[in-house]
Image: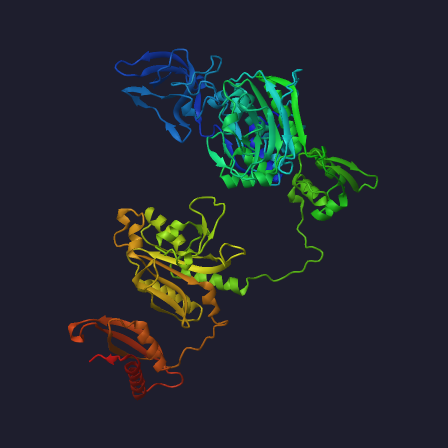
Amino acid sequence: MKVPFSWLKQYVDIDVTAQELEDKLFGCGFEVEELIDLGGEISKVVVGVVTECVPQEGTHLHICKVDCGEYGHDIQISTGAPNVYAGMHTAAALDGSTLPGGVKIKAKPLMGVESNGMLCSGEELGLNEDLYPGAEVYGLLDLPKDTVPGTPIQQVVGLDDYIFDISITANRADCQSVLGIAREVAAALNKPLKMPATDYTVSDYVDPRLSISVEAEDLCPRYIGHYVRNITPGESPRWMRRQLALCGLRSISNVVDITNYVMLEIGQPMHAFDMDTLESRQILVRRAKDGEKITTLDEKEFTLTPNNLVICDGSKPVALAGVMGGLNSEIKDTTTQLLFESAKFARDNIRKTARGLGQNTDASSHYEKGISEYTTELGMARALHLIQELGCGEVTSTHFDCSAGAPREGKRFTAKVSGINAILGITVPTDVILDILNRLQFEVKLEADGDTMQVVAPRWREDIEVGEPDLAEEVIREYGYEHIVPTFLKAATVTTGGLTAEQKAQAKAKRTMCAQGFYEAETLAFYADADLDMLHIAADAPERKVIRILNPISSHLTIMRPLLAPSLLNVVVDNLRKGNAEGRLFEMSNIYIPKQLPVTELPEERLHLGFAAWGSEEDFFAVKGAVESFGAAFGVELTVERATDVAWLHPGIAAYILCKGERVGVFGKLANDVTSELKLPKDSRANLNIYLGEIDWVAFHALVPAAIHYQPIPEFAPVQRDLALVAPESMECGTLVTEMQRACKQLTKVELFDIYRGEKLGADKKSMAFSLSFQPADKPLTPDEIDRFVKKILGNLKFKLGIEIRE
């Protein structure tokens, strides 16, 4: 929420700088996300008086002599502004000055004439008509004749101000207004609070036809309406337009501006109905009928349900309660009579309505946090006062106050000073506690025992729960958290922290992936059907059985993901578009598997490890090596078998990942047709290789031994033999390796180092050359023993697979 420093000063005599106030607000529990210096980007721009203005022949320029006070009385500046004239007071940006947006002004010739600066328009200073009159005039900013030359322009046009951008937590709904923050500032500085004027007088006129009733009191516990006639729509005064502009709102008309002003100042969203456009003079607050429609002020049509609250004119909705008014009742230049609405709506209902319809507004954001009935009353009184102050209407005697019967006073309860100190763990003097609570406008009466307090909370503090914990929080944030002394609880014991076995395993998995050159990515847990379409996943595939979001925040985030691959592929594509031609990424996150559809119970959240590698140098065997290294880190051997049925992977360059014979994952090169459909820059497609993979962490980790047993380094060196085997073209390398290892337990390592194809081998044949390592355990191996092992391996290959040694 944006709060102008100058606006706060209207309610509190602030005697500290904006920077000091920022620190005090932080100490009181309010995070100032940004302190915006309105004129901070402007330097060396001052009031200048044009003492001489001569047209430059053959150009549109004027050569001016400018009096800038202490900065110089005869500065030559050229300008092309059409409205410049001798005697004009305007903004002069001198040599070396800066303007909003980081624009730097230097002395330089214009059309051959030296210009030692620039005369500025309102737009060049970041102004608009609401911030300063005449700012949007085409040409130079024409300042009043009483402005003194050399005065910094910020002081003249009101840019010597600060904006506090404050993050308001959900529990402090009373602070989502300038007045709410002013209360906190007054308490922090121990200064009196000046309340805004709320007095007004009413005429004797009564409209007997007007009536207001609330049918859904559970959703609208308080509704105040007041009839105002003889409206004269027009422009708001400068002070109101400026304060609205400082908070990011444009002025519309005096009546509409009043509703926006009250929302910012008091924190009460208001609405004004044009009574001339209503079909009847009956206002009914009720639930919408199923299928009922309304078109809001932004010209959007919505179909409603009984879960939505509407304001009706007796026959049709004229406002979507707490969100936005209807187009059929908006205030126009022809409006002559109106009904002001100030209400309290159930915050959960407003939140669901705003999000369900995708119609989030300033009003709904206020109502979602909660509005007190005190604020509802104060907001109406302030609006009626402003109607009379601006002279734009007659406040009549016709008004209605519909209430569900909530008490018109703050919460009453008993608390103890000792109880507050017990919660804080320190001793705050009783007089300090009483002073703090009084400054925060709690009514406190200390009983004779010097400990028991009878407390009445302010009506606007609906977040206060009956008891001492909330009072302790109020006391310490004003007293100062620096007074808290760290101590152990009385029953506390020192315990040894640490990670669980599962957490350690996951951390190890991430370290292992990082060691293989992968960087960790984090993506959202949902995407859209289009992401599954991108991978050409069939409509009847198990991955299409997804959990759909009933109220997605975006059309691109509509389903809970059943795979990590689409998420990682989107990250790869984003990197390629940004010029990152190569890289490796991994993500360890849950996928979501519904137990049944439609969903009647929570889905299975299953942890997966997804990985991606892309670049001209990436190939299948490099990624396979990373997979094998991953398994080795956990003391298991990961093997592969050809995968031809994975829609999003190339059928000839894809493999299932096996652990102890069970499939635990898959990886391979992205299918060509999928790659061709990616929206990538042309220069990034050359020699592009994208590899994706996914491991079911739960299935993998279940096969990992609980403890890894290490063996001493063998005393004897391994013995190596090379074999060249002739096999059918369709034979997989892994099949041969598996059979060789089964045939001989002394065979500790098998590596493929060459593949040969030629006419001598015959059609559909290939030769695969392997390096075999035999590791002796307790004695050196003799050549005869090695020969015996090799014969056994060859015999097994011929018997099982029909494989023979190459001649």
Residue 15's x, y, as percent? 61, 28
Q: Residue at x 17, y 72 (%)?
A: 758
Q: Residue at x 65, y 28 (%)?
A: 377
Residue 12's x, y, as percent? 63, 27
Q: For the view shown, which residue lies furthest in the bottom direction?
A: 784
Residue 339's x, y, as percent? 59, 23
Q: Is the residue 214 above or below the residue 147 in the image? A: below
Residue 801 quadrant = bottom left
**Which of 300/526 is in front?**
300
Note whether residue 11 is visible: no
Which quarter shows the C terminus? bottom left
Q: Is the residue 771 above or below the residue 469 in the image? A: below
Which quarter shows the N terminus? top right
Residue 567's x, y, as percent? 40, 53
**Which of 184/463 is in front?**
463
- Residue 636 horizontal side relative to residue 204, left or right: left
Residue 700 quadrant = bottom left
